Amino acid sequence: MNTSILLATTARILNQFRHDRRTVALMILMPSLLLILLRFVFNSEQAFSRAAPALLAVFPFAIMFIVTSITTLRERTTATLERLMTMPIAKLDLLFGYALAFGLVAVVQVLVAVGISLTWLGLSIGGSVWLLVIIAGLDALLGTALGLFASAFARTEFQAVQFMPLFVMPQVLLCGLFSPRTQMTPVLEWLSNVMPLSYAVDALTAVTTSSDITGELVQDLAIVAACGLLALVLGAVTLRRRTP
Amino acid sequence: MTSSAAVEVTGLRVRRGKRLVLRDVSCTIPQGSVTGLLGPSGCGKTTLMRSIVGVQIVESGSVSVLGSPAGSAGLRRRIGYATQNPAVYADLTVEENLRYFCSVLRAPRSDVSRVIDEVGLGTNASQLVSSLSGGELSRTSLAVALLGTPELLVLDEPTVGLDPLLRDELWTLFRTLAARGVTLVVSSHVMDEAARCERLLLMRDGALLADDTPGSLLSETGTDDLEQAFLHLVRAKEAA
């Protein structure tokens, strides 16, 4: 690992975003727009406050997953990755460089979404706003890490887009948003227990209902962070210097 | 291996999918020379180049580059590689691309303007790569390969789509580099570029037809241009 190469990679990706303002606008505003839409669909602050915390985890997670998997796939299919693999860059420099760049965008995305939810949309939370931002940010990072990992299995952008329902939708269905996780049949509950998004939603729900930082909350956060890190390391393993 | 060989390929076999792309290729590329790798499209030129830079999974045989096995970590700062498809970021400017690869190679910042001059892209430096013409695009990709001080340059069809004047300038640059001791391997599918090389590797169907200087190729085949020499070798091999 070499920090200056890692940071150069992050700067390069942010520079690429700078030349593509439309993508940046979409990434930063999309979760907020969806939350605004949801607020008016529910037409009640109470109903919105119940669903919003989970969605603050789901929307950034899903969006960062798609954006990251497509961007990384583009690097894999154009010759730039092959060129980088002949250069003195460690695979983790590249992946952490990606994660850091997308992580920064994710933090801005989450700050805007949380800001709009708390001020305009009437979301009321019992715990710390900053903890809410940290959890949602960590969750967007998890989406980024999974997107980096998933892109290894896609040959084309068509396939990469199809991975969104494969990797993201089951997690959304089982994270407790539609039905409490404890009331699911044992098989579904077990599946829900092995999916990292469930822990992000649990943590967000805990923060919105109470100001206590419980052991369970810390554990949820640790699981989300560990899954993100694991996905990044697996992503590095699937990146090959030599290809057929 | 002798000290004057930059690359030594021995019995190299490469399979891509079900197809045997390289069948027992052996050759030696002398240091400080321009070696042309010529042959029709699909004959295995790119695969041989990928094997030399160490990104190709090989079935058997060995490739030794600058005294180490191809793909060794220590070689990564000593080799410049330009792929056939331009390996640059379309959504960055020429200069931003070069600055990034310059940081990855930990080469001095001044290299960016040096290589921009070398490939004649001075007026395009702040232009987005996606807005460049085909020739400018491949020169940008070539410029990346020139960053740092590579001892071996592996260039896959670097002069495709260039106007004759620019092509001539690039060949002058290649020879200047070779005179400084840099080893260049340049692939092409057009025979008129062959005459500009000091040594030629002629390939067809995954095998080497010849490994010689242009002059002795002509005298040995009794022909007066390299296109004819190539045909002569193909026919001689098929007759055998």
Image (tube, rainbow, N blue to C red):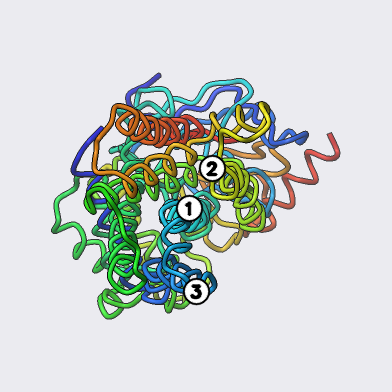
Mark 2 belongs to which subunit? A
Give the spatial CA distance, label 2 vs label 1.
9 Å
Q: Amino acid at mark 1?
A: Val
Amino acid type at mark 2: Cys
CA–CA distance in space, label 3 to label 1: 20 Å
**In the depicted view, which residue is nearer to us: A97 or B93?**
A97
Badge 3 sits on which subunit? A
Q: Percent position (x, y) of residue A186?
A: 66, 26
Disc 3 crowd rating (10 Å Cα; few below 14, some 14-19, many 20+) is few
> Which residue is the site of mark 1?
A58
Kindly give the residue lying farthest to the right in the view shown.
B239
Can you give x and y, in whole percent of width and height, for residue B94 in the image?
A: 31, 69
Per the rendering, the mark at residue A43 is 3
Mark 2 falls on what kind of element? loop
Q: Name the residue rendered at 30%, 28% in the picture.
A: B74
- Circle 1: is it few (<14), some (14-19), or many (20+) Cα within 10 Å? many
Question: In the image, is A194 to the left or to the right of A158?
Answer: left
Residue B144 visible at all: yes
At mark 3, the secondary structure is loop
Does residue B198 appear in the picture of this structure? no
Q: Eyeballing the image, is B184 above or below A62?
A: above
Q: Tags 2 and 1 in contact by the CB under 8 Å rule?
A: yes
Judge if badges 2 and 1 mark residues of a common chain.
Answer: yes
Amino acid on which disc 3 is placed: Asn
Looking at the figure, which quarter contains the N terminus of chain A?
top left
**Residue at (61%, 49%) from the top-left corner?**
A169
Q: Residue at x 51, y 33 (%)?
A: A238
Dot 2 or dot 3: first in sequence order is 3
Read off the residue under disc 2: A175
